[in-house]
Amino acid sequence: MRKDVRILLVGEPKVGKTSLIMSLVSEEFPDVVPYRAEEITIPADVTPERVPTHIVDYSEAEQTDEQLFQEISKANVICIVYSVNNKKSIEKVTSHWIPLITENTDKDSRVPLILVGNKSDLVEHSSMETVLPIMNQFSEIETCVECSAKNLKNISELFYYAQKAVLHPTGPLYCPEKKD
Ligand code: GTP
Ligand code: MG
């Protein structure tokens, strides 16, 4: 059995990666956050799947590309965060983040990805229409979730999905090529 789960958050600057982590930990929205949250470990007994879970933040402002590549290769699951009110941050999911992750992970070890649309408090419309084609194109994407660090919507769900993607991967079910 797996002994722990390592979750990495990546995405464009200012989409709210650090705020998501801090909201999960403190159960309230932090008005001011550092660029990068300290790595946190959630003990097994308070995680839904009873496995110690490490949550790792990334910030371009504080880390080199080399450090990012290292973290990508160590991660068991990667959350690619975009902001639902920022089209550019969604475009970068496919133009930048997925290729970068593919280049830095072992071809044989499938690292599940989760698409995270943050700041849902700022829009009326869901970004799912934009994101569904991306999900269909990349079988590595386990699921997508819209959330808000600000009103704490779907925050614990997001980290639960990430944990579940590692412990109970369902990838092939979503892989269009493998549908009969
Ligand atoms: P970098 O570390 O620079 O890569 O940015 P980041 O992705 O960690 O974003 P950060 O958590 O620093 O948040 C950027 C800004 O967005 C801050 O002003 C946050 O208060 C704001 N923010 C984060 N999450 C939300 C949210 O869910 N809703 C709203 N309205 N604002 C948010
Ligand atoms: Mg940050």
Image (cartoon, rainbow, N blue to C red):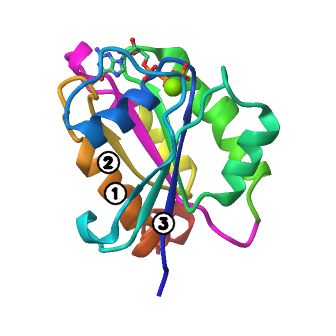
What's the residue type where badge 2 is placed? Answer: Leu
The residue beneath circle 2 is 158
Marks 2 and 1 close (CB-CB < 8 Å): yes
Q: Judge left or right: residue 162 versus residue 113.
A: left
Q: Residue at x 25, y 13 (%)?
A: 122
Q: Is residue 120 above or below residue 165?
A: above
What amino acid is labelled 3 in the image? Answer: Val
Q: Earlier in the sequence, mark 3 or mark 2?
A: 3
Find the distance from the CA under tag 3 to the CA under tag 2.
14 Å
Residue 159 against residue 123 in the figure, above or below: below
Q: Is residue 83 above or below residue 76?
A: above
Q: Residue furthest bottom?
A: 1
Could you classify mark 1 by the number of other residues whose Cα lies within 10 Å: few (under 14), some (14-19), or many (20 or more)? Answer: some
Span highlighted in magenta in the image: 107-128
Q: Position of residue 11 (x, y in %)?
A: 56, 31
Mark 3 to mark 1 CA distance (whole Å): 12 Å
Residue 169 seen by the camera:
no
Report the Cα–Cα distance between label 2 and label 1: 5 Å
Q: Which residue is mark 1?
A: 161
The numbered disc on residue 5 is 3
Residue at image position (76%, 65%) is: 106
Residue 19 found in image quarter = top left
Query: Is residue 110 part of the magenta span, yes or no?
Result: yes
